[in-house]
Image: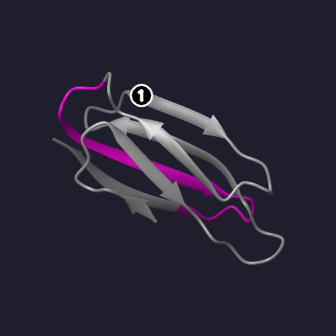
Amino acid sequence: KVAPNPLREMLNVYWGVPEKVYLKSIEVFSIGGNKVFSAKYNADSRQTQISFQHLPPGTYVLIGRYSDAKTETVKLIKI
Protein backbone atom coordinates (compact mmCIF):
# COMPACT_ATOMS: atom_id res chain seq x y z
CA LYS A 1 0.00 0.00 0.00
CA VAL A 2 1.28 3.46 -0.89
CA ALA A 3 -0.04 6.78 0.35
CA PRO A 4 -0.59 9.50 -0.58
CA ASN A 5 -0.93 9.09 -4.33
CA PRO A 6 -0.76 11.68 -5.87
CA LEU A 7 2.04 12.85 -3.59
CA ARG A 8 3.98 16.05 -2.99
CA GLU A 9 7.14 15.36 -0.94
CA MET A 10 6.96 12.06 0.97
CA LEU A 11 5.58 8.64 0.04
CA ASN A 12 4.61 6.18 2.77
CA VAL A 13 4.90 2.51 1.79
CA TYR A 14 3.37 -0.26 3.91
CA TRP A 15 3.34 -3.98 3.21
CA GLY A 16 1.90 -7.06 4.81
CA VAL A 17 3.02 -10.39 3.43
CA PRO A 18 2.38 -14.04 4.25
CA GLU A 19 4.65 -15.80 6.70
CA LYS A 20 8.11 -16.62 5.29
CA VAL A 21 7.70 -14.08 2.47
CA TYR A 22 9.15 -10.58 2.77
CA LEU A 23 9.75 -7.51 0.65
CA LYS A 24 13.37 -7.68 -0.55
CA SER A 25 13.63 -4.36 -2.37
CA ILE A 26 11.91 -1.28 -3.70
CA GLU A 27 12.98 0.60 -6.80
CA VAL A 28 11.40 3.77 -8.17
CA PHE A 29 11.84 4.81 -11.78
CA SER A 30 10.94 7.99 -13.63
CA ILE A 31 8.59 7.53 -16.57
CA GLY A 32 11.71 7.91 -18.76
CA GLY A 33 13.25 4.80 -17.16
CA ASN A 34 15.82 6.45 -14.88
CA LYS A 35 16.18 4.84 -11.44
CA VAL A 36 15.56 7.55 -8.82
CA PHE A 37 15.37 5.38 -5.67
CA SER A 38 16.53 1.94 -4.60
CA ALA A 39 16.59 0.22 -1.19
CA LYS A 40 16.78 -3.30 0.23
CA TYR A 41 14.76 -4.55 3.20
CA ASN A 42 14.94 -7.45 5.64
CA ALA A 43 12.24 -9.86 6.81
CA ASP A 44 11.37 -7.70 9.85
CA SER A 45 10.55 -4.54 7.86
CA ARG A 46 6.90 -3.63 7.24
CA GLN A 47 7.02 0.05 6.19
CA THR A 48 9.23 2.82 4.88
CA GLN A 49 9.13 6.42 3.69
CA ILE A 50 10.56 7.61 0.39
CA SER A 51 11.37 11.29 -0.13
CA PHE A 52 10.33 12.81 -3.45
CA GLN A 53 11.40 16.35 -2.44
CA HIS A 54 14.31 16.45 -4.88
CA LEU A 55 12.31 15.07 -7.82
CA PRO A 56 10.30 17.10 -10.33
CA PRO A 57 6.52 16.65 -10.71
CA GLY A 58 5.59 13.79 -13.00
CA THR A 59 4.83 10.10 -13.26
CA TYR A 60 6.95 7.46 -11.53
CA VAL A 61 6.80 3.68 -11.21
CA LEU A 62 7.49 1.84 -7.95
CA ILE A 63 8.52 -1.82 -8.20
CA GLY A 64 8.50 -4.00 -5.09
CA ARG A 65 10.32 -7.33 -5.26
CA TYR A 66 9.42 -10.11 -2.80
CA SER A 67 11.44 -13.05 -1.50
CA ASP A 68 9.14 -15.49 -3.36
CA ALA A 69 10.21 -13.89 -6.71
CA LYS A 70 6.89 -12.03 -7.17
CA THR A 71 6.85 -8.34 -8.03
CA GLU A 72 4.34 -5.57 -7.49
CA THR A 73 4.20 -2.41 -9.60
CA VAL A 74 2.51 0.86 -8.57
CA LYS A 75 2.14 3.99 -10.72
CA LEU A 76 2.88 7.16 -8.73
CA ILE A 77 2.03 10.77 -9.53
CA LYS A 78 4.06 13.61 -8.01
CA ILE A 79 2.31 16.98 -8.11
Residue 47, image x, y percentages: 60, 55
| Magenta stretch, residue numbers | 55-71
Give the left or right position of residue 62, taking residue 17 as reference: left
Residue 78, image x, y percentages: 22, 42
The residue nearer to you, when weighing 25 against 51, is 51
Residue 53, image x, y percentages: 32, 27
Callout 1 secondary element = strand
Q: Residue at horizontal 37%, vertical 58%?
A: 3
Q: Does the magenta stretch include residue 27?
A: no
- Mark 1, residue position: 36
The residue nearer to you, when weighing 33 against 57, is 57
Locate the C terminus by quadrant. Answer: top left
Q: Residue at horizontal 50%, vertical 43%?
A: 49
Residue 42, image x, y percentages: 78, 49
The residue nearer to you, when weighing 35 against 79, is 79
Residue lying farthest to the right in this orientation: 20
Q: In which quarter of the image is residue 58?
A: top left
Number of marks: 1
Q: Residue at horizontal 80%, vertical 57%?
A: 43
Q: Residues within 10 Å of mark 1 (few under 14, many from 20)?
A: some
Instruction: Examine the rendered structure and indicate whether residue 53 appears above or below residue 73.
Output: above
Q: Does the magenta stretch include residue 64?
A: yes
Instruction: Examine the rendered structure and indicate whether residue 70 appears above or below residue 10.
Output: below
Residue lying farthest to the bottom in this orientation: 18
Specify how the rendered protein is coloured: one colour
Give the left or right position of residue 17, taking residue 52 as reference: right
Instruction: Examine the rendered structure and indicate whether residue 33 appears above or below residue 76.
Output: above
The residue nearer to you, when weighing 31 against 37, is 37
Instruction: Residue type at mark 1: give it.
Output: Val
Q: Residue at horizontal 27%, vertical 56%?
A: 5
